[in-house]
Image (cartoon, grey):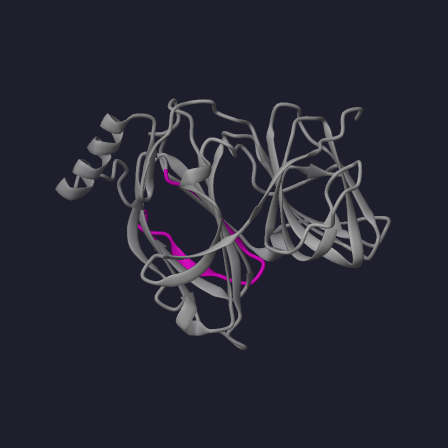
Amino acid sequence: MRNPRKIKKTFKSKPTIEGAGVRLKRVFGNSEVPQFDPFLLMDDFHSRNPDDYIKGFPWHPHRGIETITYVLHGEVEHGDSMGNKGIIHSGDIQWMTAGSGIIHQEMPKVHGDGLMWGFQLWANLPSSQKMMAPRYREVRSHQIPEVKLENGGMVKVVCGKVEGVHGPVKDIVIDPDYLDVSLPSDSGFKHPVKEGYTVFAYLLQGKGCFDSEGGALIEPETLVAFGDGDCLSILAGEGGMRFLLVSGKPIGEPVAWYGPIVMNTQEELKTAFEEYQLGTFLKQAKT
């Protein structure tokens, strides 16, 4: 590791409303394409007020992407057109590959103290895989390995590798890393990344420095986009911090995006919505 990545840009998440009236914060989205290629969108939903999230995300289609839902606290009920259904609990991950088409719903539930906190990340699929068969992966919190660092920190490895420990989510087209990193006060985290890949961090709690050459402390609810290089050097501020670290292989293809469907051309997009209206959207039978 000889080429540490530096901060290229920072983004502060912004309040928005999605679904049937869910109040959340958009970390990045349509207006940032293609800066985060192969990633398209990231939302942070975080509230103790059930009125902010209880209306949820009723039945809607997806095609051409993968949606990754990570629930830190709370419960989300899920159902889809392939017959999958269940509840995503605190610490669980739902990795759904929409591919050729899926219709699903995600409905947050009021639980315990009312706190709902989670994230949804959209990953694009290349043209050669956009019409792949849909698949659904539900990863329970106990299936996600935790790597304890020498400095007292801890890394939950959803996908990728930390100190020889691999995450449970594998065989993903964009070859992603998805890490949940917690560091104690004034401690560091060094991590190798692949050159040419898109890499970003999203700070959940605390403050820290994300540039190997120092610089200002980053505040919570801020996304850090990195320039190119083969490693990261991150330092927690006083009181420690927690952040998500994500990377993936850029696709480098045109993006035609409207609502929950992302294709390569406007013609493909038009076809997808026409099929949805005609009832021919789903290409795989319910299992």
On the image, the x and y values in percent for residue 232 come to 74, 35
Identify the residue at the far front of this view: 216
Front-lying residue, 133 or 38: 38
Q: Residue at x 83, y 50 (%)?
A: 187
Identify the residue at the far right of this view: 150
Q: Residue at x 20, y 41 (%)?
A: 276
- Residue 285 in sight: yes
On the image, the x and y values in percent for residue 96 come to 43, 44
- Residue 95 in sight: no
Q: Which residues are magenta?
A: 80-98
Question: Residue 226 is drawn in which quadrant?
Answer: top right
Say left or right for 240 vs 137: right
Say left or right for 107 vs 265: right
Is 87 a magenta residue? yes
Front-lying residue, 256 or 135: 256
Where's the N terminus, which quadrant? top right
Q: Residue at x 31, y 34 (%)?
A: 100
Identify the residue at the far bottom of this view: 113
Q: How many marks?
A: 0
Say left or right for 73 vs 271: right
Where's the C terminus, which quadrant? top left
On the image, the x and y values in percent for residue 173 come to 49, 29
Q: Relative to 53, is 96 above or below?
A: above
